[in-house]
Amino acid sequence: MGEEGSYDVLYIGTREGKLLRGVLSDVPEPHLAKREWFPEKGDPGLGGNAGGGFLSCAPALAEGIYSTPSVADGTVYIGTYGGEVYAIDAYTMREKWQYPRSGDVGRIVGSPVVADGVVYIGSSDNKLYAIDTETGNKQWEFETGDDIWATPAVHDGVVYIGSFDRKLYALDAETGAEIWKFGTGGAIGSTPIIYNDTIYIGSFDRKFYAINLDGTEKWRFDGADNWFWSKAVAYDDIIIAGCLDYRVYALDAETGEQAWTPFETEGEIRADPALVGDLVIIGSDDDKVYALDASTGEQAWLPFVADDHIRAPLFADEDTVYFYTNAGTLYALETEQGRKLWEEVTKEP
């Protein structure tokens, strides 16, 4: 989500290969005031909710979008399942560049991360790419031993990226040189978080790891019954992570001991959670959104039932949590009580 003037703007990628730009308004009540598409080839384009808008000459995206857009300095960056990276003007929705200029880099599932004028993004061709934000030229690439579906994290000049080759890599952000690698017993599909000089990440080996910045293991948690896929969040020295075993785990950041009893949902947890104040908001494959007190694990409000599975990362500001379902519906809930503010079906008839 980004800001434009006095308005907030949401950017959402869809499996139909479109980028939605939604302008939010609180007058007279919270709603999606306007939406526009960066459309596929042959699409008439949409300005607001009417056909024939100014986007009619926008170029096509290659196949669906499984990653989350990244917005920086007036530009939206997105990777596609067709293997292309786009930089799109956040206001006009017109393409600035695409990488590569022709062909593709393999299916992109993870999201781009922008830091210090560089876009970092992984691909199913086993590589992490560093691309200049202004020109779209590749600065470097780093090859792992298998697909990269994870989203990288950048911290103090180091890029951290997990691979299906069962390793977490630390790379020099400027050169792409390998600093160290840490092996797990399973593929890594989640994004690491860095908290108090420690890296936290889950693996498909059903374990969750705390790793020191020098690449040595601090602790591991092995009490889960399935893969860790989603990104964790940190709250007051507690690391909170959802798992495909339907549970939300809370682990002491220093010791790895459980801080509160795992919270059980009725479905796999694939979506990255959102942290709002002292609440952690969780989306599940049981089609529900849960709000938990981050310090105790107690439910803050009754689960909200959506129209389909929730697998895209949740996003929240101080008052509102936004999430997108597999059915193509965008929801906005107020965070205090979980009341629905609005919903918008993004799939076109």
Image (tube, rainbow, N blue to C red):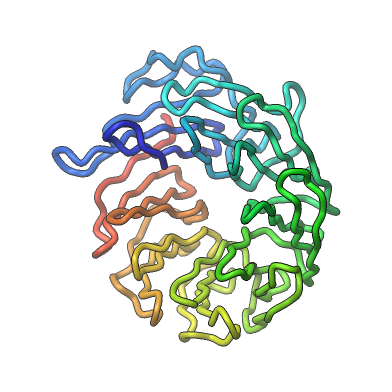
Q: In this view, does 128 lie to the left or right of 328?
A: right
Which residue is the extreme one toward the right? 145
Depth check, front residue: 63 or 106: 106
Q: Where is residue 243 in the image (x, y as percent from the top left)?
A: 57, 70
Depth check, front residue: 287 or 98: 98
Q: Position of residue 184 (x, y in %)?
A: 77, 70
Depth check, front residue: 135 or 61: 135
Depth check, front residue: 16 or 1: 1
Residue at 63%, 52% (x, y): give it.
Answer: 154
Which residue is the extreme one toward the left? 28
Q: In this view, does 21 lie to the left or right of 258?
A: left
Q: In this view, does 118 lie above or below 169?
A: above
Residue at 75%, 34% (x, y): give it.
Answer: 139
Quarter placement of the C terminus = top left
Q: Position of residue 155 (x, y in %)?
A: 62, 56
Quarter placement of the N terminus = top left
Residue at 51%, 38% (x, y): give it.
Answer: 13
Q: In this view, does 327 lie above or below 250?
A: above
Residue at 62%, 23% (x, y): give it.
Answer: 97
Q: Position of residue 112 (x, y in %)?
A: 61, 43
Number of numbered discs visible in the structure rendering = 0
